[in-house]
Image: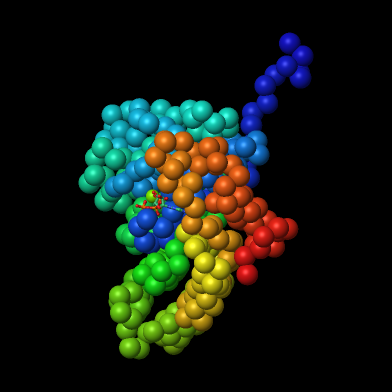
Amino acid sequence: MSQTDIPLIPDYSAKQIWAIGGGKGGTGKTIVAASISILLAKTGSKVVAIDADLGGANLHTCLGIRYPKTTIADFLLKKITSFDELLIDTPIENLKFISGANDFLTIANIPYAQKQKLIKYIRNIPADYIILDLGAGTSFNVLDLFLISDCSVVVVVPEPTSVENVYRFIKCAILRRLNNSLNTSRFQDIFKLATEARGNESIKTLYDLLERIYRMDSSVAADLEKKIDTFSPKLIVNQVRENDSIMIGSSIRDITKKYLGVGLDYAGYIPYDERVSEAIKKFKPLILEYPNCSASLCMNLTLKKLLSNGQPVAGKEAK
Ligand SMILES: Nc1ncnc2c1ncn2[C@@H]1O[C@H](COP(=O)(O)OP(=O)(O)OP(=O)(O)O)[C@@H](O)[C@H]1O
Ligand SMILES: [Mg+2]
């Protein structure tokens, strides 16, 4: 055997975890996660799509898989011994899939130790891209999976309730990120006030929070400020029916910057397109069934923007 016959060990050192979240249910997180996974796999990258919506798993349907034979529940309930057994082949070259836990609803509230175990395994999956489809809401499980990602994406629809939810989701995510980075409980009371659903009178913005912490310890406040500066989720506006709605992405970006100090990156919009539900009803992946429909074309453009790390790409450009 010559040296060139020895198979090379794939190098996944540049592996990226992407998480698709956003707070509200039904905005299109799963269809975006499925489409991005397939498009990335089509470029030749090794991709693993994970249904991390442990209480309402349905990513398999958008990938054209009817009955996943193993799920994360089997792993958490120790029905299978190795995490690798969860990796399901898909009909799409370069794409593997890990199913959520639909068959065991209470698994949505997994205990802390199990969540850490799951996160450790996810980080070790050999792949170029790991795409996490998150559930709705702002539970710590959802937020912690969102926060392990190298590229965090939020999907919003142009409706006031969705905009409110995505703002709240980003607020909860940044507060969780800051809180996780502290190794002292000294500031817990301040964080509690900042997390209040309707906003506390004395801590309305993240700047108020930083100011309170600054008064107690300026170096901690400076560290937290850096954590805010380096947190830059990508925003996708989905189910756009009229041109005016495209601007909602820019408005959310401005408000988030003003009150949370978080610099969102508007990655693009996807139009409302009947083909999406047609593909789902047929149990077919949208991108493969209708590659030239407007939703698929815009998914493609949005992915290009995500891959270009926020730099504008040629073509239809989000304002
Ligand atoms: N661009 C679109 N055009 C038309 N319909 C869409 C579009 N995006 C999503 N939908 C519809 O919205 C439904 C919900 O989408 P999806 O399941 O991806 O949302 P989700 O955010 O993952 O929901 P959940 O929070 O329940 O997991 C889909 O079944 C589909 O019919
Ligand atoms: Mg979903």
For the N terminus, the image quarter is top right
Quadrant in which residue 313 is drawn: bottom right
Front residue (pair 180, 312): 312
**Residue placed at 42% from the left, 36% from the top?**
282
Quadrant in which residue 138 is drawn: bottom left
**Residue placed at 73% from the left, 16% from the top?**
5
Q: Where's residue 89, x and y in %?
A: 48, 28
Q: Residue furthest top?
A: 1
**Residue placed at 68% from the left, 26% from the top?**
8
- Protein image colouring: rainbow
**Residue placed at 53% from the left, 58% from the top?**
271
Left or right of 94: which side holds 54? left
Q: Is residue 264 above or below residue 76?
A: below
Q: Is residue 7 above or below residue 107?
A: above
Front residue (pair 254, 160): 160
The answer to whether one can see residue 130 in this image is no
For the C terminus, the image quarter is bottom right
Left or right of 225: which side holds 78? left
Q: Where's residue 10, x and y in %?
A: 64, 31
Q: Where's residue 37, x and y in %?
A: 54, 42
Front residue (pair 42, 181): 42
Q: Is residue 306 above or below residue 39?
A: below
Q: Where's residue 182, x and y in %?
A: 42, 68
Quadrant in which residue 100 is drawn: top left
